[in-house]
Image: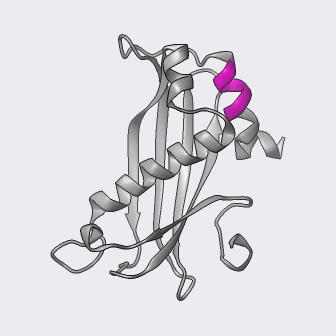
Amino acid sequence: MSDHFDWQYPEPFITSWEIQPQDIDHYNHVNNVAYLSQQEKLAWAHSRALGLGLEHYQQAGRGMVIFRHELNYLKPALLGDTLHCATWITQCDGKITLSREFQYIRESDGETVYRGHTQFACVKLASGAPTRMPKAFVNIYLPACLASQAD
């Protein structure tokens, strides 16, 4: 699936999203909240594929929480479109922060319709206070980071 699209980075983690009526807003294109919701689902799917699910976060008493989103709507997506949604971990300091990039490409014409960037910080689940990533997080997220792979 990723071979014939122009992804911004190599080796994306990809899911497909078929646009449904509940994703459409009053302008008859995908609502901004639907993009953000899909972005969250995609990030969790990637984390689970890497071996870190919510249960691991809960066991560690730590979580990666969002502190900044950037959402860029490039072209409208419409009811019935299929979007191939990709994510990459582009920054991980192995301490507290991690960043992801997102790109959604419409299947029918190969056009990029959306790009996003999200920054996460590791926090204690009980208090919400910033804290260092547990070793298990570092051991999974750091090798998956594009910046680490370039070294």
Q: Is residue 26 above or below residue 56?
A: below
Seen at 51% across and 52% down, the residue is 42
Say whether residue 48 is visible.
yes
Q: Is residue 120 above or below residue 110?
A: above
Quarter containing the C terminus: top right
Instruction: Report the side of 62 relative to 128 (left or right).
Output: right
Q: Position of residue 135 (x, y in %)?
A: 68, 17
Dividing the picture into quadrants, the one containing residue 79 is bottom left
In magenta segment, residue 110: no
Please give the range of residues in magenta.
136-141
Number of dots carrying numbers: 0
Seen at 68% across and 25% down, the residue is 138
Q: Which of the pair 23/6 is nearer the observer? A: 23
Q: Coloured how?
A: one colour
Q: Is residue 97 above or below residue 6?
A: above
Seen at 65% across and 69% down, the residue is 7
Instruction: Report the side of 107 relative to 151 (left or right).
Output: left
Seen at 68% across and 21% down, the residue is 136
Dividing the picture into quadrants, the one containing residue 36 is bottom left
Residue farthest to the right, as pictured: 151
Q: Position of residue 81 (x, y in %)?
A: 42, 81
Say whether residue 94 is visible.
no
Q: Position of residue 48 (x, y in %)?
A: 60, 40
Q: Which of the pair 46/129 is nearer the observer? A: 46
Q: Position of residue 105 (x, y in %)?
A: 53, 74
